[in-house]
Amino acid sequence: MRHARRRVVRRVTRLAAVGGLLLGATMVTRAVASEPGTPDAVPFSTASPAGKAAAGPGAALVQRLGTSRTAGSWIGSDGRTVVAVTDEDAAAEVRAAGAEPKMVRHSMDDFDSATRTLSSAPRVPGTAWLKDYRTNQVVVRGDTTVTADDWSALTDVADGIGDFVRMERVRGAFTTRLNGALPILSTAGRCSAGFNVTDGEKDFILTAGHCGPQGSVWFADNGGRQAVGTTVGRSFPGDDYSLIAYAGGTAGADPGVVAVGGGKGVRITGVADPTVGQRIFRSGSTSGLRDGEVTALDVTVNYPEGTVGGLIESDVCAEPGDSGGPMFSEGVALGVTSGGSGDCRAGGTTYFQPLTTALTDLDVRLIVAPQEGGGAADPSPAPSQGVAAPDSASPGSSAPVRNILPDPSTLLSRLTDPRNVGPGLLVMGGSLVALVASRWIRAEQDRKAYRRQYSAMWG
């Protein structure tokens, strides 16, 4: 009777082990089959430097008329496109195109000449200059760190350019916002994750360049246990963008969504250049979701660490730790947070690295969210399609935040994640151990039985 029970136990064990092998193989097969494919991504080819200044709804008009007859374009309070022109013939062409002309004295060529002169002057940290399309002036700003002597010398340079250069003092100091959507941390400080991008084989985070040098290792927690990735590409100063390669090679479950706080996110559906007057939104790990208006393009800022050009200026606020966070409007990605002055209590000015420049220089594509119906993502919107009237603009369609950053936790948690092949391999391994153990136990039992029989026979 006892031997019969043992045989039953052995048979049940072997059957369970074989069943475990089959189950584990099925789990592995399903996990491999459900691996996410290449995410939707949209390429973007930036225009020439001359074309960048004319970005926005009036881009085609400005480019067609030329920089000697125009001085930028912007969105009016009623949502109409306004183009600054220097002659009546150009104004007539603007009206014929359905936009509103504004006669001005100085052209974009005058602006470019003025900014080149300012750039060739001795560098003064804490200063910035921009082309103010709406007032037809070049504005030079100095923060509280600029000494009276330096400001006087820069004023002399401005006076030599002409009366369309305006000098302004601002509160606070121009600093990079190191210290956004989601926080990422390294030994260099804390920044915010910007947008997810891909080169077709691996996924990356595109964030601010001043956040850390090449080779910086980033984590999602203060303890340094949840590795996010490593900085593999960077441009700062000059530009302000960097590329963080994900430790696992791929982004999280919803790579086309940016976090805006409270467990909520915004679906990113395209990429474009902004325009002056456009209402924009930015998200950062310190101050959350904030909104403002684009006030200038092609801005040069002399940070203490170095000079950065081609930036976007906005009256939206930002604080330390918001660096690298995403800037967007109507679900269209526009830039990543660079720096600025002031804070979100008293207000201030924030500068952004244009996303189109970074995508082209780094040769990567923006990862976008699929259409809500499950279709393929739309291509990059044309400027006229991606800009809404300031009063009606919104961040974009909302989406829950679900593992935008991949779970970079311990090996055990990865093995137990049912989306991976780990659980199936564990089941298969356990089944093999049980099968081998049952065979070994049976062999031992047979050997003992043979010894007993041999001893009894010869005894």
Image (spheres, rainbow, N blue to C red):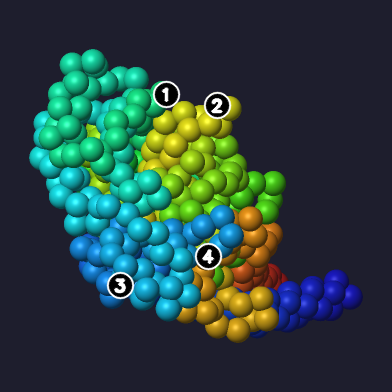
Q: Amino acid at mark 3?
A: Asp
User: Is the residue marked by circle 4 packed among few (<14), some (14-19), or many (20+) residues within 10 Å?
Assistant: some
Identity of the residue drawn at 66% across and 76% down: 372
Label 1 – label 3 distance at C-alpha: 42 Å
Label 2 – label 3 distance at C-alpha: 45 Å
Q: Which residue is mark 4?
A: 80
Is tag 2's residue or tag 3's residue first in the polypeptide sequence? 3
Q: Which residue is mark 2?
A: 346
Q: Secondary structure at mark 3?
A: helix
Q: Are marks 4 and 3 in contact (CB under 8 Å)?
A: no
Q: Give x and y (percent) for residue 60.
A: 35, 74
Is tag 1's residue or tag 2's residue first in the polypeptide sequence? 1
Residue 283 showing in the rendered view: no
User: Is the residue marked by circle 1 packed among few (<14), some (14-19), or many (20+) residues within 10 Å?
Assistant: some
Q: Secondary structure at mark 4?
A: loop
Q: Nearer the viewer, mark 2 or mark 3?
A: 3
Q: Give x and y (percent) for residue 43.
A: 37, 74
Quarter of the figure that contains the C terminus: bottom right
User: Is the residue marked by circle 2 packed among few (<14), some (14-19), or many (20+) residues within 10 Å?
Assistant: few
Closer to us: 171 or 443: 171
Label 4 – label 3 distance at C-alpha: 20 Å
Is tag 2's residue or tag 4's residue first in the polypeptide sequence? 4
Is tag 1's residue or tag 3's residue first in the polypeptide sequence? 3
